[in-house]
Image (cartoon, rainbow, N blue to C red):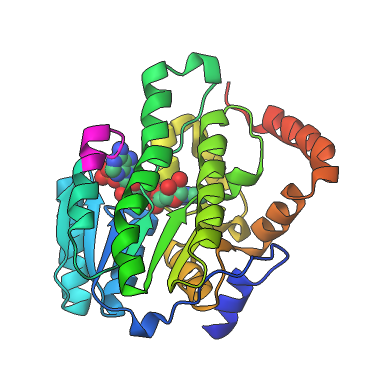
Amino acid sequence: MRATYLLDTVGPVRSRRGAQVELNKLSGTAVITGASSGIGAAYALELARRGLRPVLVARRQGLLEEVAARIHQVTGVTCEIWKADLSRRHQVEEVAVKLEAIPDLSMLVNNAGLGLVGKFDCTDAATHAGTLELHVVAPTLLSRAALPGMLMRGCGAIVFTASVAAFFWLPDNVNYCTTKAFDVMLADCLAQEVRGTGVAVQALCPGFVRTEFHDRLGPEWERIRRLPRSLWLSPEQVVAASLAGLERDRPLVVTGLPYRLLAALGRQPLLHPALRAATRIWHRRTACP
Ligand SMILES: NC(=O)c1ccc[n+]([C@@H]2O[C@H](COP(=O)([O-])OP(=O)(O)OC[C@H]3O[C@@H](n4cnc5c(N)ncnc54)[C@H](OP(=O)(O)O)[C@@H]3O)[C@@H](O)[C@H]2O)c1
């Protein structure tokens, strides 16, 4: 397990030092957004295993209840459920108020997200705005609500599930790439700001993960599933890498060796013209009609 952690977190993408979290000493409540499936559900289960009390946030009440029941069955921990649509500002604000009131909040995982594909000008304005609320406004306001208590107690962790897409310029993914790049920058800036306070901040950047994420893109994107197995990780592997990253003081975690190499290349400005050209060629070959 230790070797897996190393492979998942130590790579060519070097992190700047943040705050190390001793997860076995964390207790209390953990709020996980996007916990009704995929990475969020796996995160909630793992935190419950480690003795934290998860609050599960998402829109689908039925699935949230199923996740809570499974967590209870496996760990004996009872989860709280907050049904909320985080693409709607007033619901984000309601969640923020409840978050602020948790006296023992030790972790916030800003994980709720959706893939948005399609030509920028063909996607309606409301969809663009909703994704900005979900990927940009919600993580910002929820972190703003969580941080004062964590700083006062001198411990805690905030994770932003971004994406390896944050390092690239993918046609037909303009909104997704830019909002995920915002999450990486937000995490990085915040990690520097809270350095030395006992609060850790991390941008978690997965590559392809086997979740519902790609099902939601529509059947024409089914071909993505045929990409080599070596490019796919399980939600549990992503969560293990994130938690190991917190324990190892890594504010940036890119999961999986191919993606760490890609992200390392994506962060070299001299290579950008060649990478942009390669991206366009790859896109032309794989784009849906
Ligand atoms: N899977 C990948 O390949 C991959 C790669 C890189 C990054 N990511 C990122 O990882 C995160 C988790 O995705 P996943 O792969 O686990 O996919 P997933 O299984 O589809 O999970 C997405 C989660 O976000 C929630 N969500 C979506 N829109 C929401 C809204 N408006 N309000 C509240 N919750 C909302 C969903 O719950 P409800 O539908 O019940 O609301 C669900 O729990 C996302 O931020 C995604 O961008 C995924």
Compared to residue 50, the image places residue 148 above or below, namely above
Location of residue 54 (image quadrant): bottom left
Which quadrant of the figure contains the C terminus? top right
Q: Picture coordinates of residue 164 (x, y %)?
A: 59, 50
Residue 121 placed where, x, y %? 53, 14
Up/down of 245 relative to 100, above or below: below
Check residue 142 for magenta coloring. no
Number of marks: 0
Which residue occupies 38% across, 52% down? 111
Q: Looking at this view, is 180 or 119 the one in front?
A: 180
Magenta segment, which residues?
86-93
Relative to 94, is 289 on the left or the right?
right
Residue 235, quarter of picture? bottom left
Q: Classify 89 as above or below 235.
A: above
Within the magenta stretch, is there residue 87?
Answer: yes
Q: Which residue sits at x=17%, y=51%?
A: 82
Asked whether residue 41 is in view, the answer is: no
- Residue drawn at (63%, 74%), measured in percent from left and top? 7
Please report the residue visible at 50 percent of the width from the left and 73 percent of the height from the top: 196
Query: Vertical placement of 130 versus 147: above or below?
Result: above
- Magenta-colored segment: predominant secondary structure: helix
Tell me where residue 200 appears, x and y as whole percent: 46, 68
Quarter where residue 137 is shown: top left
Does residue 133 show up? yes
Nearer to us in this view, 116 or 248: 248
Left or right position of 244 against 44: right
Classify residue 23 as left or right of residue 274. left
